[in-house]
Image (cartoon, grey):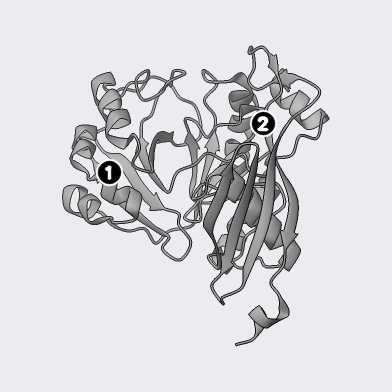
Amino acid sequence: MSACATDSRDFDEPVSGTAATAKTWLLLEQPGPWGARALTSSHLDPAVGRALEAAAKDTGVRVVLIRRPGRHADCGTPTERQVYVAHTVPGRTWVRSATTADPGRLLDLDFAALGRGDHHSFDAVLQGRPYTGDPLALVCTNGKRDRCCALLGRPLATELVASGAEGIWEVTHLGGHRFSPTVLILPYGYAYARAEAHTVKEVLQGVQEGRVVVEGCRGSSAWERPGQAAELAVRTAAHEYAAGVLSVVDTVGAAPRWEVTVAHEDGRRWRVVVAQGASLPPRAESCGSALGTPARMDVVSVREPAPTALAG
């Protein structure tokens, strides 16, 4: 195991509130090798990659490359690529699927609308349709970004496929290399740290049953990091594991302290105080980087609903 993941695990660094933030994920299949910045350093046309990055900026959409687990020899340009788009906001989650021979067509998408949860441009441009397969599990494996992701992520993806799990893809970057292997689950958008095959399969089973597995969860990408930590804290405090029933409806404050309001679909609300702390002792946030004190989200308090709020 390489240094940054080893240190994070040995120091028992908390993982809550560390997920990448994106209300919508756009996944483009790109076989073959990936560079550190995969959209512009793979066999995808770098001009297309740069244009996709620019189009997605500040829209709530995150564009990543995916490939099937296994060997990644340079096998030329695929004639058809799989494309997914997934919206992760609770109560409005969906996944759409399409194929394309021309990745440049993705530039015709309405990225602002996708970020809001409107998939009409995806359907119109790419003949998108509802994805009805198994939940998607995206395992970060980009060793050019951080060697932990290759050394720990690739064996996990291979083991999951060998076990018969469906919907498994390798993905270019999910952030948090020191939490490798890291996995993103769609459609709900929850990320997981230090994942093992049996826990990923439990998480996937949970998705099919409409529940969220909290153990090892970094948070939902639908929320900013204080909200991620607050939502997970409410789930634990209230023993509420049903998917799609909790939303972050308000966040007041700024680093290093926030008050987050988490609402249940039944009307209950919780006020959660989250403080930004520093992870000690110093450790590398990524292999090869200088020692630092990565920010952590510490839940200070969870104020449960008053009994009157439970009525009706």
Screen quadrant of the N terminus: top right
200 sits to left or right of 24: right
42 sits to left or right of 51: right
User: Quadrant of the rendered structure where residue 119 is?
Assistant: bottom left
> Residue 181 shows which numbered tag?
none
User: Quadrant of the rendered structure where residue 263 is?
Assistant: bottom right
Taking the spot 53% from the left edge, 56% from the top edge, the residue there is 250
Q: CA distance from mark 1 to mark 2?
A: 30 Å
Q: How many marks?
A: 2
222 sits to left or right of 154: left
Q: Secondary structure at mark 2?
A: strand
Q: Nearer the viewer, residue 215 or 34?
A: 215
Circle 2 residue: 295
From the viewer's perspective, is residue 13 above or below residue 97?
Answer: above
Say whether residue 54 is visible: yes
Which is in the foreground here, disc 1 or disc 2? 2
Looking at the rendered structure, the kind of residue marked 1 is Phe
Looking at the rendered structure, the kind of residue marked 2 is Ala
From the viewer's perspective, is residue 92 above or below residue 128?
Answer: below
Q: Position of residue 148 (x, y in %)?
A: 64, 24
Q: Secondary structure at mark 1?
A: helix
Taking the spot 25% from the left edge, 54% from the top edge, the residue there is 128
Q: Position of residue 274 (x, y in %)?
A: 68, 47
Circle 1 residue: 111
Q: Earlier in the sequence, mark 1 or mark 2?
A: 1
Residue furthest front as drawn: 253
Q: Position of residue 264 (x, y in %)?
A: 58, 70
Crowd class of label 2 (few under 14; some 14 to 19; many from 20; radius 10 Å):
some
Q: Nearer the viewer, residue 89 or 124?
A: 89
Q: Nearer the viewer, residue 133 or 48?
A: 48
